[in-house]
Image (cartoon, grey):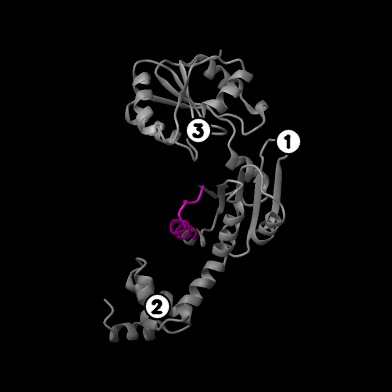
Amino acid sequence: MISVTKPGTLYLCPTPLGNLEDMTFRAVRVLKEAAAIAAEDTRHTIKLLNHFDIHVPLISYHEHNKDERGPEIIDRLLNGDTIALVSDAGMPGISDPGVDLVRLAVASGVQVVPLPGPNAALTALIASGLDTTMFTFVGFLPKTNKHRREMLAKLAKHPYTMVFYESPHRVRATLGELTEAFGDRQAVAARELTKKFEEFIRGSLDSVNRHFSENQPRGEFTLIVAGCPVGQELAEEQDKLAGLTLVQAVGELMSRGINKKDAIREVASQKGLPKRQVYQAVLESDLV
């Protein structure tokens, strides 16, 4: 027996990335039964609703009005209205302001019901050919150069597959930044997912970057990048410690939260020295 929507519930309804056949029966039913639909871009969502013959009032809810509109939606939910939340495409709450509405709903004691459905990150990942055992969703990188560089520096040694979102006018620059930060590792650029011109460009970051320097990027992009290769982080760590004195190397490890005893053992191991020699050097220094 098919259940009906519950009053005072916020439903998170995924919408197709492009191919309307990806809309689920359940999502269509929930949208039809809702008192209102909160949409990121009402002009975009009305096309979807018209296709499925859905005639439900729309509420504009986006990044620039969420602080005002969010509490209004919560009030309606607390008064018993059923509200469906959609994004322009894919899963609401992923790289869009839906996450803020969900936080408000949870804090207000409103029931939140997620519906399964399309998601660009997972759709691209499973067809990428890269490791899916463990992965990290990064989404869009920060807008400012400083914050973007800081984030990429932190991710450079990340061991798991990474998933990024990017717009067509930024993808060339982003691929260049990824290559500079990560080196030339395996990567996939997925564009126009589920649409007529769906395409996967597979190779290395350098080769994918060259492809789009010769071909105009079109459509929204999901970039999949392999994690730091096994052994590379260790080699970089050894190279860094090799350039330091014994005391400096121990101090460097201690600054990362490693206790002195373990730091001495690690430095001795990496430099191929007796542990007592490193201990004596530290003892004669003023290292706390």
Along the line of sight, which residue is nearer the eye, 1 or 67?
A: 67
Instruction: Indicate which label's residue lies in the foreground, 3 or 2.
Output: 3
- Locate residue 81, reporting x and y percent: 40, 16
Question: Crowding at label 2, few (<14), some or many (≥20) Cα neighbours within 10 Å?
Answer: many
Up/down of 185 relative to 271, above or below? above
Question: Crowding at label 3, few (<14), some or many (≥20) Cα neighbours within 10 Å?
Answer: many
Q: Residue at x 57, y 55 (%)?
A: 174
- Name the residue tied to disc 2: 249
The C terminus - image quarter: bottom left
Q: Residue at x 59, y 33 (%)?
A: 118
Q: Is residue 226 visible?
A: no
Helix, strand or loop: magenta stretch: helix
Instruction: Indicate which label's residue lies in the foreground, 3 or 1.
Output: 1
- Locate residue 143, reporting x and y percent: 47, 51
Kindly indicate whether the residue at mark 2 contacts the one at mark 3 (C-beta within 8 angstroms): no
Up/down of 85 relative to 144, above or below? above
Query: Which portion, as a residue range, is magenta?
Result: 140-152
- Name the residue tied to disc 1: 196
Position of 18 with respect to 55 (left or right) is right
The amino acid pointed to by label 2 is Ala
Up/down of 267 relative to 104, above or below? below
* SS label for mark 2: helix
- Name the residue tied to disc 3: 92
Position of 63 with respect to 22 (left or right) is left
* SS label for mark 3: loop
| Mark 1 or 2, nearer chain start | 1
Q: Residue at x 60, y 48 (%)?
A: 169
State the CA–CA distance, disc 3 to disc 1: 23 Å
The N terminus - image quarter: top right
State the CA–CA distance, disc 3 to disc 2: 47 Å
The amino acid pointed to by label 3 is Pro
Instruction: Indicate which label's residue lies in the foreground, 1 or 2.
Output: 1
